[in-house]
Amino acid sequence: MRGAILHAPGDVRFEQRDDPKIINPTDAIIRMSATCVCGSDLWDYRGINPVNEPTPIGHEYCGIVEEVGAEVTTIKPGQFVIGSFFASDNTCPHCRAGYQTSCQHREYVGAGGAQAEALRVPLADGTLVATPEVPSDELLPSLLTASDVLGTGWYAAVAANVQPGKAVAVVGDGAVGLLGILSAKQMGAERIIAMSRHEPRQTLAREFGATDIVTERGDDGVARIQDLTNGIGADAVLECVGTSEAMTQALRSTRPGGNVGFVGVPHGVEIPGQELFYSHVGLRGGPAPVRRFLPDLIDLICTREINPGKVFDLTLPLDHVADGYKEMDERRAIKTLLRP
Ligand SMILES: [Zn+2]
């Protein structure tokens, strides 16, 4: 098969690779229907995370099951399936508590490199969720978002305790932030404030349910959110970036008693204890337990309640994966969909 390999910062190549094989009896092999480039792939692409050797890349996937190991019982060849970037058994105490990304037996699915024609998925019964039937082509972009970016935005909203009628602010206008807006809307938030400076992203934010756009940052951004919430602050804030500035923005935009959900992978974030203590703000985040939400999200997509696939503003054939990275790196694309 062919797949993407990151050789060095800025150097992604689509090349011949060994076909994935069943290694453990709980594995499945899927034939990729669609995959994509994640904002977090750019940390590797830009060399912010070191690249020490040629590495398969990509961790968002959906496709048709081709083969399963001897101990796989619920997942069957021919099914269309979606899974999370972490494989999980879905039976251990952490999985049962809804934190499948902390599964006692978790494995990083992306180690196999999902930007490829096929992929090995460990712990198939626990990790993969099958749709009732093979979906029509036009649903594929939205179903693919459930693998990570939608599940992560959804978790940010859950972690921030978004409730009907409440005021929500979203820090970050990347694909996760935009789908955090969609999630907050779906959960009944009344006011959704998107912090964004980029026109095409502002437009999409409004389509997904943002009621207000704030372009200011830092203290001015905090002041704008105070203005928009009668001097109270937002009830729930979604931090979808991972920088120190974004976390500070999120914590200071939240009202006393409110909550921040943080899903941006932190790079250089330090949280001052005294400030957090006196703020009365609750904080929860981490790698999204996407598996917890997959059945509900698949249902919302298949019944066309939500259309998160709109977040893809560029679609390329999989063998043009290098262009997909370049377009996102240079901020000409929000998110690139790749079709084998
Ligand atoms: Zn588990």
Image (cartoon, rainbow, N blue to C red):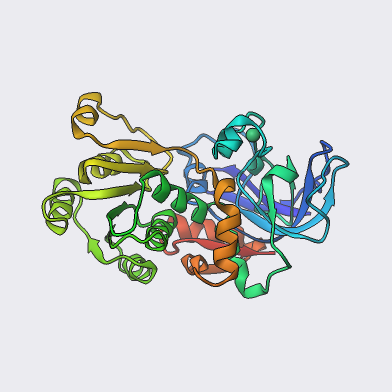
Location of residue 146 (image quadrant): bottom right
Using residue 319 as the reference point, say whether residue 18 is left or right of it. right
Task: Spot the residue most to the front.
Answer: 164
| Quarter of the picture holding the N terminus | bottom right
Who's the residue at 24% across and 30% down the image?
276
Q: Nearer the viewer, residue 245 or 134?
A: 134
Residue 337 in the figure: left or right of residue 224: right
**Residue 280 visible (yes or no):** yes
Quarter-wise, where is residue 285 in the image?
top left
Residue depicted at x 35% and y 65%: 205
- Relative side of 281 to 241, left or right: left
Q: In the image, what residue occupies the spot 82% across and 54% down?
A: 76
Foreground residue among 279 and 66 = 279
Residue 121 visible? The answer is no
Q: Name the spot of residue 131 as percent of width and height, x first.
A: 69, 62
Q: Give percent across and percent down for residue 170.
A: 31, 53
Q: In the displayed structure, would residue 127 be above or below residue 266?
A: below
Residue nearest the viewer, comparing 125 with 56: 125
**Hey, which residue is sitting farthest right in the picture?**
70
Quadrant in which the C terminus appears = bottom right
Ligand 1 image position (quadrant):
top right
